[in-house]
Amino acid sequence: MRTLNIYIIFLTVLFTNCATLRDRAEELKVHRRMEELKTFEEYVTADTEIKKKNVLAAEITFIDGRDLKTQIKAVKGVINNSLDERSINKSVAIYDYQGKEDYLSYTLIRQLTFTDYEGKKRIFVNKGDQFDSLLEIMYAGRIKWFREFYESPYNSFRNYYDIFVKESGEEINDKVAIKLKNKLIKATAEKPVLKEKIEQTNKLDDQTVIALLKEFEQ
């Protein structure tokens, strides 16, 4: 009974946190035009101490080509304190030199680069109007691999789907429930020898997928 109660409390906190994140995003003023922002220099905070929680140093390339070294607010997940990508892929909270937050729509950003709480370099890019958020670059070789994060409509949990872009420009981008293995087989179809190897792989974690994409290039 005690274990059940703890589990119920955990789920309550988790759902509350997700709902709070979603509700706050809806309430915040998100800037969607460059003219709405403060002067560019006010956001140059790479050497400024921001006394707030969940702050990461970041580099932003805007759609007008300007580069900015700044600091952003990036929310941690409930379970393991790793980054919750939903907090930075649709709008990005950047700090000015006074430590005040301004929320930028992803449509103003060409590329967002930072090192997350686990020391991993992350790069998110704007792939155009067909996507409604920034996509993470998982691998950039002959085949490019992107990942889009979203909130599950059923339980508010973080979820994602993967997109592969072949050299020809063809996208393997089926949002319908399709296994990663099938997407990877389609993406690497020009090298049939990989099909069996992919099918026999028990666990397709990120590093395994990258290794297979590198093998495709050999």
Image: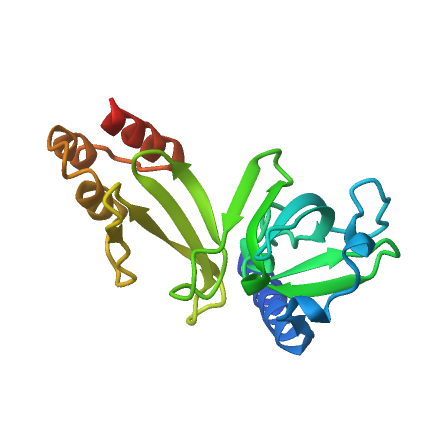
Residue 79 drawn at (x, y percent): 58, 50
Q: Quadrant of residue 33?
A: bottom right
Q: Is 128 situated left or right of 101 in this image?
A: left
Q: Nearer the viewer, residue 202 or 177?
A: 177
Residue 25 drawn at (x, y percent): 63, 71
Q: Is 168 situated left or right of 208 in this image?
A: left
Q: In which quarter of the image is residue 200?
A: top left
The number of discs equals: 0
- Residue 71, can we see it? yes
Farthest-out residue, bottom:
27
Q: Is 178 situated left or right of 11 in this image?
A: left
Residue 8 drawn at (x, y percent): 56, 64
Q: Is 168 drawn above or below residue 85 in the view shown? A: above
Q: Which of 24 and 44 is in front in this view?
A: 44
Q: Is 213 drawn above or below residue 179 in the view shown? A: above
Residue shown at 16%/31% (left/top)? 194
Q: Quadrant of the C terminus?
A: top left
- Residue 2, can we see it? no
Farthest-out residue, top:
218
